[in-house]
Each structure stands twice: as C-alpha cells, then as structure tokens.
Amino acid sequence: MAYEIKSPIPGIFYRKPSPESDPFVEVGSAVETSTVICLIEVMKTFHEVRSGASGTIASIEVDDEEMVDAGQVIATLEPDDSGN
Amino acid sequence: MGVRVVKPGMATTIQDLGRPGYYRVGIPPSGSLDQYSSLAANLLVGNDDSAAVLECTYLGPQLHFEAPTVVAVAGANLPPLLNGEARATWESFAVAEGDVLSFDYLEGGARAYIAVSGGFDVPQILGSRSTYTLGSMGGVEGRVLAEGDWIDTGDTSRATPGRVVPESLRTEHPKHREIRVMMGLFDHRLTPSGRQTFLRTEWRLTPVADRTGFRYQGAELEFEERDPPFGAGSDPSNIVDAPYPIGSIQVPGGIEPIVLHRDAVSGGGYVMVATVIGADMDLVAQSAPNNTTRFVEVNLETALEARRDRSKRIEELRMAVAS
C-alpha cells in the first residue's frame, strides 16, 4: 500500500531548496520520517513538508512551482516493509 | 485556567473585534478578518462579542487544555479533532482537563476561529487583545503563537456545550467568489478598457495573502496617460500619497490587485481603483490561494443595503444560537 504525502497548507510547491540546488527527493529516493520532501510557499514564507513515514519515493504528483491545495497529495512512497 | 500551545499551526494569532479609532495615527484596526465567523464561535461558547479568539490560517494549532471548558470552531472548514476524535465545526463541545485539540487538513475557506468559554485572556492594548504583528502589539507578545506558549482563559460559568449554528447561517466556502466593490477613489486613472478588464477578469488569489492584504493575479490594467503631478512617482499606478481605506484595492504597476485587510498600512502612493464593501470583507478573509474572485461593481445604496442584510443575519445568528 502506497503511503500518501500531503501538503498541510495551500501554496506554491517547490522541489528544490533553491533554484540552483538538486531536488530534495527523486522517485526511488530512500526517505526517513523526518526527510524534507518539498517546500510550500505561502504568505511570503517557506514551509518544509516532511515525509511522515520511511520508505522509497514511488511518485511525485505535482510539477515544480505549481499551486497546491491543503490536503493535496504531493508524493507517494512505498513504506519500508518491516516484515521482510 | 488556560491552554498550552503544543504546536502553533501557521500564523495563529489572538484576535477580537479589533482596535478601531487609531488608523489616522498609523495603527490599523486589526481584529478577526472574518468577523462573522469569529462572532459565531464566541456566541457558541456563551461569550460576549468582545471576547478574544484564536484566528488560524490554513493550518490548525495543537492545544493542550489544563482545565475543563467548552470550545467551538467556526469559519473555515478546518475539522477539529479532540484527542484524535472528530468534532464538528459551528458547534460547541465540552473539553476535559488534559484533552488535546488538533485539526485535520483544511477542506474549505482559509481562516478558522477557535473560541473558548471565557475567552483567551491577554492584556488589552488600546482597548483590544488583537494581535498586530507588524507593530508587535496585542495578543501574546505581539506575535503569532509559538510552541510552548501558555494562554490564560477566562470565566467558564456561561459555558454551554451542544450549541449549534444552523446550516443556513454558516458561511459557505466556494472556490469562486463574487466580491462587491464600489469604484474609486482613483478609478478615473483607468482607461475605459482598464476598468472593463478590472471588472471582467477572473482574478486568482496568490499565496501572497495575509492579514495586511490579499494579492490577486489575472490581467494587466490600462491607465490613462498623464504627466505625474508633483509628489507622485512616474509609474502610471502611482498617486500623490493618500490614506488607504480598509478594503481598498491598490494595483501596483497595473498588475496584481491587492485588497487591503485589517492589518493594512494606513497610506501610500498606489492608485486605489475600487473598495470592497464592508459587508463582503468577511468573504475576502475566507479566500485561499488559487481561489478565484470577480469584483462586482455596486453603488452606495446597494452597499448600505448589504450592510443592513449583514446586520440582520447577525441578529438571526444571535437568536439561533441562544435558543
């Protein structure tokens, strides 16, 4: 079951910490619960969105610098399977 | 009695009816941007109109209650969770000592108001508890809430859980709004085509929308040619500095109109092409980024009629919640 990472706030979605940097994560990146997935800009400030679960990024659902709504899915991940 | 702020949410501030009467010396009225919803939350928990509430923008806080009380959330559709269990908005509910109030994702609107029986108690500055962050006054140390803050709450003797605002008196949160405006004072600076563009464009709210102003995108307005008068900048959107009414719509550079709200600066040199009527300022407050707005021109008579309608709705709200 894929885990959905949602934006808690509406705003502009940024995949990179700055225009010159590499994206925070790519499809296939291994992430921890506290890994930053993206930035959301609203009210002239940038908010980090963290993964919320550990696993592997399966998809990124929003294009860079696109507007998102609160609760919108921005990425999905395959959680680590502790059973294996 | 009081609450501990476990997580502050985003730009959560203490607000009330505001601090009117000092705008002429540069201190804006502040207060809840959506006064109707803020009042509804107060009425639901048995408070006076002047009790202070929490204004939460987009993201709710997490609060730990250190004494039993009654709470209500009104305004944006920001679903409350009490110890993780869903509670309704526009209804008052009991909270026990040790309970934790948190929120699910925003489902509509932009600003939710949390009222607690007896009100949030902070020192009054110029007759109000409202937070004005740019001036570092009111609320908790003149700023947005922070993790670990303690806020005293008042007398809970009038607390009544289970009060409900009927469906017909709740604010709806569509993604498109029609906001009524009166043209002026500087609409003569627009060409007829610029005026048409202003009134016909479906403006989209940008993420640059806070208690000071709401900035929209969608078109560029055309201004009349002129020689700038002494004191005005050379850009066609500049004027000789003038006072800015709350609700006035300035258009720097002819692009991105900004509706000024209750924390606005009191004057400046940008052309104001129109002013949102008082009755519709609550609607502006509930606009979220990406929502669309059309500005609809009305005359003074209609604006005053709308004000009377709003007063009537508030009386209906009082009756409905008290019964």
Image (cartoon, coloured by chain):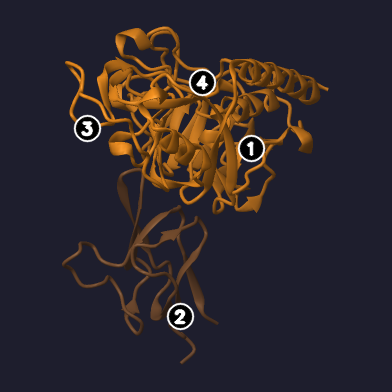
Q: Which chain is orange?
A: B
**From the viewer's perspective, is the residue at label 3 or at label 1 nearer?**
3
Chain name for mark 4? B
Please tell me the colour of chain A. brown
Give whichever of discs 4 and 1 has the lower sequence position. 4
Quote the CA–CA distance across marks 3 and 1: 59 Å
Query: What residue does disc 4 label?
Result: B16
Is residue B185 something one can see in this rendering?
A: yes
Query: What residue does disc 3 label?
Result: B235
Mark 4 residue type? Asp
Mark 3 residue type? Asp
Q: Residues within 10 Å of mark 2 (few under 14, many from 20)?
A: some
Mark 2 residue type? Pro
Quote the CA–CA distance across marks 2 and 3: 55 Å
| Nearest the eye: B184 or B63 | B184
Q: Residues within 10 Å of mark 1 (few under 14, many from 20)?
A: few
**From the viewer's perspective, is the residue at label 4 or at label 3 nearer?**
3
**From the viewer's perspective, is the residue at label 2 or at label 3 nearer?**
3
Query: What residue does disc 2 label?
Result: A79
Chain name for mark 3? B
Give whichever of discs 4 and 3 has the lower sequence position. 4
| Nearest the eye: B181 or B11 | B181
Relative to B216, B237 lies left or right: left
Give whichever of discs 3 and 1 has the lower sequence position. 1
Q: Residue at x 34, y 76 (%)?
A: A31
Query: What residue does disc 1 label?
Result: B96
Relative to B162, B104 lies left or right: left
